């Protein structure tokens, strides 16, 4: 039982809820529960030492994250990371990202919108100076960087397509932001890309973007595969009387 989840009566309810959500999310992402395990509110609440209400709310949020899924019986089940199309989607992503930079080389294209890029650069400079703690939800800030970079290129269709790809790989991309070193490197690489584009050094920006996305894919693939292995090892540790896995 995790005593870190116990809080006194003066702790804001939202904080307690966020703690439960964060702890359950962490356990899911390290593969502590077997794949397709049914997450029963009462049992999960007992495991975490909390009431059922924050667990119920956490499961709803985790469903939106793609870390759990609903079964035909209406229950919540552990979702296994889907790596089947990951490389294809990353290939599409890098194509869109690179085009967002390189289209400024076309003679009939005005170039990147400085009024969009300068605030973006300043935002990531602030993150560099006051780095956030590792958190899978950092993926949303990461996506915002790449979407804003694409938007600055002036092609709305390109940006919308990139947003669609991002939504499909978000659940596995969260594995990229579990450690401080990955947060640090992501911030520095984002700054490098933004500053190269602002300086008009597009060849250097293309190289930096390609390296950044490629390294991210390697980390995501490795960590998600490890989680899948752990899920397989933990499969069937507990059973309901009806022989279906559950916690």
Image (cartoon, rainbow, N blue to C red):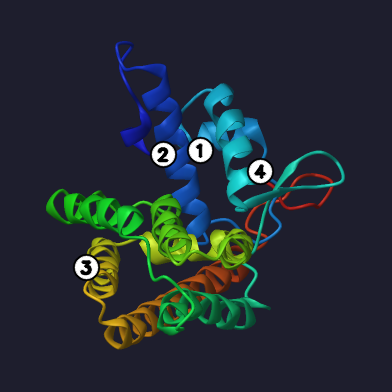
- Farthest top residue in view: 9
Q: Secondary structure at mark 4?
A: loop
Nearer-the-camera pick, 92 or 158:
158
Q: Is residue 129 left or right of residue 219?
A: left
Q: Which mark is residue 47?
A: 1
Q: Secondary structure at mark 1?
A: helix
Q: Which mark is residue 1?
A: 2
Choose the circle earlier in sequence order: 4 or 3: 4
Q: Quadrant of the C terminus?
A: top right
Q: Which mark is residue 39?
A: 4
- Residue 36 position by quadrant: bottom right
Q: CA distance from mark 1 to mark 3?
A: 38 Å
Nearer-the-camera pick, 242 or 147:
147
Choose the circle earlier in sequence order: 1 or 2: 2
- Looking at the picture, how far across and down is residue 190, in whole percent? 29, 67
Q: CA distance from mark 1 to mark 2?
A: 6 Å
Choose the circle earlier in sequence order: 1 or 3: 1
- Looking at the picture, how far across and down is residue 233, in whole percent? 58, 70
Q: Is 55 placed above or below 145 here?
A: above
Q: CA distance from mark 4 to mark 3?
A: 38 Å
Nearer-the-camera pick, 147 or 224:
147
Q: Which mark is residue 188?
A: 3
* Front label number (2 vs 4): 4
Discs 1, 2 touching: Cβ within 8 Å? yes
């Amino acid at each position: 039982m995790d005593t870190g989840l116990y809080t006194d009566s003066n702790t804001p309810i939202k904080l307690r809820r966020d703690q439960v959500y964060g702890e359950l999310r962490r356990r899911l992402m390290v593969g502590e529960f077997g794949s397709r395990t049914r997450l029963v509110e009462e049992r999960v609440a007992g495991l975490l030492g909390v009431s059922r209400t924050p667990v119920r709310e956490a499961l709803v949020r985790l469903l939106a994250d793609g870390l759990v899924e609903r079964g035909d019986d209406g229950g919540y089940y552990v979702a296994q990371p889907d790596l089947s199309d990951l490389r294809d989607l990353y290939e599409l992503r890098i194509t869109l990202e690179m085009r967002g930079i390189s289209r400024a080389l076309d003679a009939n294209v005005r170039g990147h919108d400085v009024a969009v890029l300068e605030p973006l650069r300043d935002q990531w400079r602030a993150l560099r100076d006051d780095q956030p703690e590792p958190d899978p939800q950092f993926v949303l800030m990461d996506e915002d960087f790449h979407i804003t970079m694409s938007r600055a290129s002036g092609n709305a269709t390109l940006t919308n397509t990139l947003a669609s790809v991002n939504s499909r790989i978000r659940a596995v991309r969260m594995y990229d932001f579990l450690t401080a070193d990955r947060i640090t490197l992501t911030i520095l690489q984002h700054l490098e890309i933004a500053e190269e584009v602002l300086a008009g050094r597009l060849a250097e920006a293309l190289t930096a973007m390609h390296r950044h996305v490629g390294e991210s894919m390697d980390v995501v693939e490795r960590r998600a595969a490890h989680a899948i292995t752990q899920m397989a090892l933990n499969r069937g540790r507990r059973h309901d009387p009806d022989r279906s896995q559950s916690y």
